[in-house]
Image: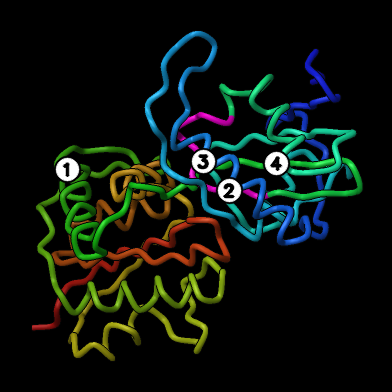
Amino acid sequence: MTLSIPANLLCLSLASAALMLAAPARANEGDQLVSLINAWRAAPGSCEGRRVAPLSALKTRGALAQLGIDSGRDLKQALEHADYTPRHSEALKVSGVSDARGVMAILREGNCRMMLDARFADIGVVREGSTWQIVLAQPLMEGKLKDWKDAGRAMLRAANAARATGRSCGGRDFPAAPPLKWDSKLADAALEHSRDMAHEAVLSHTGSDGSTVGKRITREGYTWGLAGENIILGVGTAEDAVAGWVDSPGHCVNLMNPAFTEMGGAYALDRERRGGNAYWTQVLSTPRR
């Protein structure tokens, strides 16, 4: 939508941005504007009559600096095309300004609420002639994930909480199932597969080397009698991963299968390629006695 503010400042939301891939602003110009914005965020003063606490600096992301101006694609679609998945994002355009300081003056006058939003951590600047575009985004995973082993243990707790209650998985009823036990070899196999998927940017039960879950846990030295695997992409916590599997009939069947007695879990992500998207793997098994 068009805002009534100086120099034709256009604010674009997820529903209305018209963007495509394009060349970023020349490095010195974009970097200068980012530096000015970060200096403002470090000492913001007030916004719309309210005092604002100092904010962290924004980090330039190549994916955001390559979203072109006015291309007929909305912001969400453009970010997906750039393999960047945000939790929240906004973009604005300033026209008729020749330098970064002129853009900054307009931002201070008409858009402090967006520029001083504490949720945002990433930024990208594009310039075409006298038109500038600034994209701000909150990465999907920002501040959510810790060590993969801690996340895996959280997955175990969430899985056992789900198994503690009987449920229907795609019309198939399951009673409550016994709790799963953690196994480090299964966890290593889960980590291997998550890293492989993140590296290849592909969500698949088949590894890039053609491996299956059974082959992967065998490589870790685990002797299994029954093996299964759940995977999911793009959720922010282990609890969200398990919730997604509960809502998916096939994954739910794996999760509630009382024949499984042990599990391992992990995540991996490629921040540069996927904008914080995480690949989660849960490996379920029963050892062969």
Q: What residue type is labelled 2?
A: Ser
The residue carrying mark 1 is 161
Numbered range of the magenta stretch: 115-124
Q: Quadrant of the C terminus?
A: bottom left
What label sits on residue 134 in the rendered view? 4
* Snapshot quadrant of residue 9: top right
**In the rendered structure, which disc, 1 or 2, sits on the residue that comes first in sequence?**
2
| Residue 82 on the magenta segment | no
Q: What residue occupies the far top of the structure in this picture?
A: 49
Q: How far apart, in angstroms, are the residues tagged by discs 3 and 4?
A: 16 Å
Q: What residue type is labelled 1?
A: Ala
For discs 2 and 4, the disc positioned in front in the rendered view: 2
Mark 4, secondary structure of its residue: strand
* Snapshot quadrant of residue 112: top right
Q: How far apart, in angstroms, are the residues tagged by discs 1 and 4?
A: 44 Å
**In the rendered structure, which disc, 2 or 4, sits on the residue that comes first in sequence?**
2
For discs 3 and 4, the disc positioned in front in the rendered view: 3
Q: Which residue is drawn at 47% across and 81% down?
A: 207
